[in-house]
Image (cartoon, helix red, strand yellow):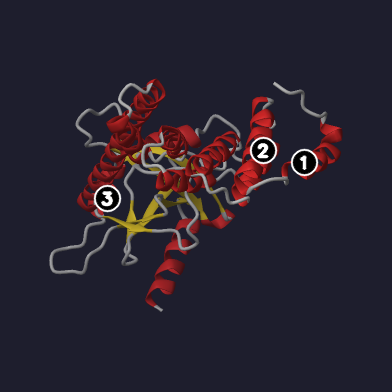
């Protein structure tokens, strides 16, 4: 192979070469550009090689074989440079010139495979195999494309199965909400809640819901969240764990009023009915209690952005004042 100029000498060398190769007939000029392009291609100087092949094409040679070779060689450069659209355009022109151009079909197939157009890549291989059945490169490319197609189809099946499973899970969840008189209220600003209702994974029958629950303390304008409240759990269990009498009160409860056994719990339905939650009631019990009476409009607990909300108050005056204020506001 001829030695190539160093990178820093490229401009001078290219100018000198171009002045020489522009002498002769169009075919001779194109052939000279082709040979220079081949030298640069062998040296892995793909951009420079591409430039020479392009000048060869622009010389408009009359020999169809030379035209096809320049186009296929330029396609080889663009393959290395990952200009796959250019590869396909040049190979298409080469095939128009010669419908039995194995190189054009092969490089088209490579570009199509890189673009993940596996069916078209396989088609290129099959069309080439009709007239060049022993071409090892074509056979190898077809095997790669077929393997990639199988992987692509497997991934698509898995994706469809995930979608189907998600849709089925969502359907079952919606049915569970309806059965429990839960009314979904999406978040108006569209933000996603980090907690979401789901079935208990330890229940193989998928009949036990786990939901995020907020406990609001309106007199202190604060709240707690129980991220996974199993619906069969009584509220008393959570209140005992959160407000045991033997430990210091929360920072916000300076009066020490929030103590297990001295607290009242309320739920508010969609139609603003106020439900007092008994100590032994489970979350599922409260859901059933929220159901509208026969002949009345639909009612239930609101599942706002995937969460249920309950109000926790100290028994006595604070509780009574909040209940009175709530009813006045509701009835106004």
Spatial distance from mark 2 to mark 1, Cα to Cα?
A: 9 Å
Q: Considering only order in the chain, which callout, 3 or 2, is on the residue closer to the N terminus?
A: 2
Side of 269 relative to 227 (left or right): left
Please state which of residues 232 and 314 is positioned toward the viewer in this rendering: 232
Q: Is residue 216 in sight in this rendering?
A: yes
Q: Is residue 322 above or below residue 114?
A: below
Residue at the disc numbered 3: 287
Find out whether the residues at labels 2 and 1 contact each other: C-beta distance under 8 Å: yes
- Say the numbered circle drawn on residue 32: 2
| Residue name at image x 46 percent, y 68 percent | 325
Residue at the disc numbered 1: 20
Q: Is residue 49 above or below residue 59?
A: above
| Residue name at image x 78 percent, y 39 percent | 17
Q: Position of residue 294 (x, y in %)?
A: 13, 64
Which of pointers 3 and 1 indicates the residue nearer the eye? Answer: 1
Question: Quadrant of the image for the C terminus?
Answer: bottom left
């Amino acid at each position: 192979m001829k030695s190539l100029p160093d990178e820093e000498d490229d401009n001078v060398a290219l100018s000198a070469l171009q002045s020489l190769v522009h002498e002769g007939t169009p075919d001779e000029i194109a052939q000279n550009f082709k040979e220079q392009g081949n030298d640069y291609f062998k040296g892995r100087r793909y951009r420079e090689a591409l430039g020479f092949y392009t000048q060869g094409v622009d010389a408009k040679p009359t020999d169809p074989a030379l035209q096809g070779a320049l186009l296929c060689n330029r396609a080889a450069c663009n393959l290395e440079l990952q200009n796959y659209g250019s590869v396909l355009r040049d190979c298409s022109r080469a095939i128009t010139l010669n419908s039995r151009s194995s190189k054009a079909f092969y490089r088209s197939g490579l570009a199509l495979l890189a673009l993940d157009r596996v069916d078209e890549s396989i088609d290129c291989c099959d069309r080439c195999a009709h007239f060049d059945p022993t071409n090892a490169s074509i056979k190898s490319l077809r095997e790669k494309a077929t393997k990639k197609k199988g992987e692509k189809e497997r991934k698509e099946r898995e994706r469809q199965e995930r979608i189907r499973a998600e849709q089925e899970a969502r359907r079952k969840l919606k049915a569970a909400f309806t059965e429990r008189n839960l009314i979904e209220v999406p978040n108006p600003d569209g933000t996603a809640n980090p907690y979401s209702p789901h079935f208990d994974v330890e229940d193989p029958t998928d009949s036990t819901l786990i939901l995020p629950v907020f406990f609001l303390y309106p007199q202190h304008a604060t709240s707690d969240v129980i991220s996974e409240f199993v619906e069969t759990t009584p509220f008393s269990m959570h209140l005992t764990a959160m407000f045991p009498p033997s430990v210091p009160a929360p920072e916000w409860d300076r009066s020490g009023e929030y103590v297990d056994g001295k607290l009242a719990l309320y739920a508010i339905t969609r139609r603003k009915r106020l439900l007092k939650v008994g100590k032994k009631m489970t979350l599922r019990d409260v859901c059933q209690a929220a159901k509208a009476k026969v002949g009345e409009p639909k009612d239930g607990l609101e599942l706002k952005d995937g969460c249920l909300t309950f109000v926790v108050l100290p028994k006595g005056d604070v509780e009574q004042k909040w209940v009175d204020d709530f009813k006045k506001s509701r009835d106004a």
